[in-house]
Each structure stands twice: as structure tokens, then as C-alpha cells.
Amino acid sequence: MKRTITHMADGRELFYYDRRDDTDRGATDPRDLPPRPPASQMRYDPLMDEWIAIAGHRQTRTHLPSADECPLCPAHPASEIPSDYDVVVFENRFPSFSFVEATGDFTDPGGLSEARAGVGRCEVVCFTSDHDASFGSLSADHVELVMEAWADRTAELSALPGVEQVFCFENRGAEIGITLPHPHGQIYAYPYVAPRTRHMLGIAARYRDGSGGGDLFADVLAAERKGPRVVASNEHWTAFVPAAARYPFEVHVYPHRPVPDLPALEPDERAAFGPLYTEVLRRLDALFGVTMPYVAAWHQAPVTYRRDLARLHLQLFSIRRAPDKLKYLAGSESAMGAFVNDVSPEDAARMLRESVITG
């Protein structure tokens, strides 16, 4: 793999990840871009013990452009990327967090909600230059290149001052709320440990203390590998529907070896991920014969917080519960965080295993 760092017209960094070492990356960004927006403001919610980012500048981000105006397709006037590419990563033009100097009033008239600058970084990961492709259609070696980019960015972002956790994810489908249909994901470098991660690691700590040193993630994986909810597996990875799945079709993908994050994976583990994961994605699409919307979220160890307890795994879930029906997160889920699933996890796993992949 060859990594090349260049810069966009407004100073944002852009990283090319190429299979060939002789690829020329001398093309420059010819656009006349406005200044980068200031950092967002973070406000503390004292009732939930959580930080919320207020990023008003994101209201103006590009929304579902036509294919000939897609900013992730290379080398045209509206493109963020000046030349064709294998995999590319760049700083988001409309970031939720950044290191640009913040502006505005950071005082709270009520006095209970602390405010501070939304220091951090948000990056876009373009999986391929092919506008009509999908992650599930990528070859195994191309997925391995994406993983190299994820691991590289995780390591570098984790070293930035003020970054507490790095989150790699993909949103796919209009039903999920994507603003760009080109196959891509994002990376958030949070200035705090995300609420779900804090909660999971707190539970893992209690499990360890109550079981004489047990590893909650290892024990969950061991139990699922013996049960009826395995969807796919190979020497290094297992994909399964969790026993208490929140979504109609939810799959967790674990490496067999306990590692904290993507940079810790060995080359053979990275190579083995692509064939298994793309199989699961193709099974999702084949399930109802329609493109499945989904969120794919890598859970990685925070930079310092309870890092010894965390274990890398991927959470993949879709809100589609039938060919013409979606699972809406309405009153119970949105207001109370109390999920009600319409599909049993055992049925979901069976349906995915029996899903016939074509093409």
C-alpha cells in the first residue's frame, strides 16, 4: 500500500491509499473555496451526563446531488478529490468536530450546562471511485485496503491532542438519512468517550469484578459461536445476530482474537475480514430483493479510558423489517431508549443464512 498526503484548496488534508507504489498524486485542487467553518460548540446535558455537539454550519452541507455533481466522484468541477483513486480519506468540509478556532458565546444563562469548543476531527472515507458500487460489491483485496485506511487513520487520530475515542462507520441508504449516495463512510475523532461506549465498558467492568476476572466480550462471543444465531464465520471472524438484537436485522462481527482496535489486527485477520463481511452485506441485500439501508459501526477502545476492558467489534444493523416496511424508532425507542424488536433474532439469523446471493 502507498499512502500520499495532499491538501485541498482550503487547507484540509486528503490521504490517498493506493495499491500501486508508482501512482502519481501530483494533481492539485483548483477550486476557490470559502474559509473553513469554526469548531462546533459542545454543551453538557446534566440530566443524562452526556455532551451534545451544536454544529449549525452543517445545515448547509451538500444534500443528495445528481451523479454528475457528486463531490466524491473524482476529477470534475464539484469534486472534493482532484484525481481518480482506490481509497481516499479527507477532512470533512462540514465537520461536527474540528481544530479550527471556535467562535461565539460559551456561557450558559441557566448555569447548569457547561459549554466548550467541539475540538476533534471528522473525516470522510471514500471506499471506491465507482459511484454505483457498494461496500458489499468490493473485492476482498479492496476491502483490505479500506481496512488499512481505517487502521492508519485510527492510529493517527488517536494521537491528536484532546481526542478520546475514534469511531469509524458507514451510513447507507436514503432511509438512514444519507446526504451523499456515493459509497463512503466517516470517521469521528471525539473529544469525549461516547455514551454507548462508556455504558458498555461500565458493564464489562462489573462483569469482570463479579466473575473473578471474566471478559464479557469474550464470553459473549464464545456463547454465540455455539448457538443458533451464527450467520457466517471463518478462521478469524464470526458474524452473528445477538440474542437481544434491537433492530430487525442486526449482525455483530467479532475477531476471534481479542484486540482493542483496528490497528491491532494482524495482516491475516485484516485479509480474512473482507470475504466474510461482504458475504453478510450481500445476504442482507438478497433478503428481500431490495437494497438494504444499514449502519455499520466499528466499536473500538477509547484512547485511554478503560482501554483494557474494550474489544474491537463491528455492529451492523438495518431498519428494514420487511420488503415494504421500516422499523421506526418512535416513542419507546426514541424517548425512553427502550427497544421493541419486530423480528426474533433466531428468525433473522436463519433468514440471513438462507438468503440466496446472486451475481
Image (cartoon, rainbow, N blue to C red):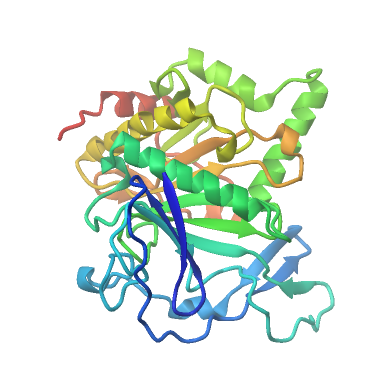
Q: Position of residue 22 (x, y in %)?
A: 33, 51
Q: Nearer the viewer, residue 288 or 215?
A: 215
| The N terminus, quarter of image | top left
Residue at horizontal 61%, vertical 70%? 98
26 over 239 or under it: above or below: below
Residue at the outermost right position: 111
Is 28 left or right of 218, judged from the image as shown?
left
Point out the residue furthest to the left here. Answer: 359
Q: Is residue 127 left or right of residue 191?
A: left
Locate residue 42 relative to residue 36 in the image: left or right. Answer: right
Q: Quadrant of the C terminus?
A: top left
- Residue 270 drawn at (x, y percent): 46, 32
Residue closest to the far front: 22
**Quarter where residue 257 is shown:** top right
Horizontal relation, residue 128 to residue 265: left or right: left
Q: Position of residue 242 (x, y in %)?
A: 50, 29
Q: Is residue 161 visible?
A: yes
> Which residue is rendered at x = 75% and y = 67% of the image?
44
Residue 337 seen in the figure: no
Which quarter of the figure has residue 46?
Answer: bottom right
Instruction: Work out whether residue 350 or residue 15 is closer to the camera in this orientation and state it.
Output: 15
Q: Give above or below for 30 relative to 154.
A: below
Residue shown at 63% from the left, 69% from the top = 53
Place of residue 301 in the rendered image (x, y in percent of width and height, measured from the top left): 66, 41
- Residue drawn 47% across the image and 53% down it: 329
Residue furthest to the top in view is 226
Q: Nearer the viewer, residue 123 or 245?
A: 123
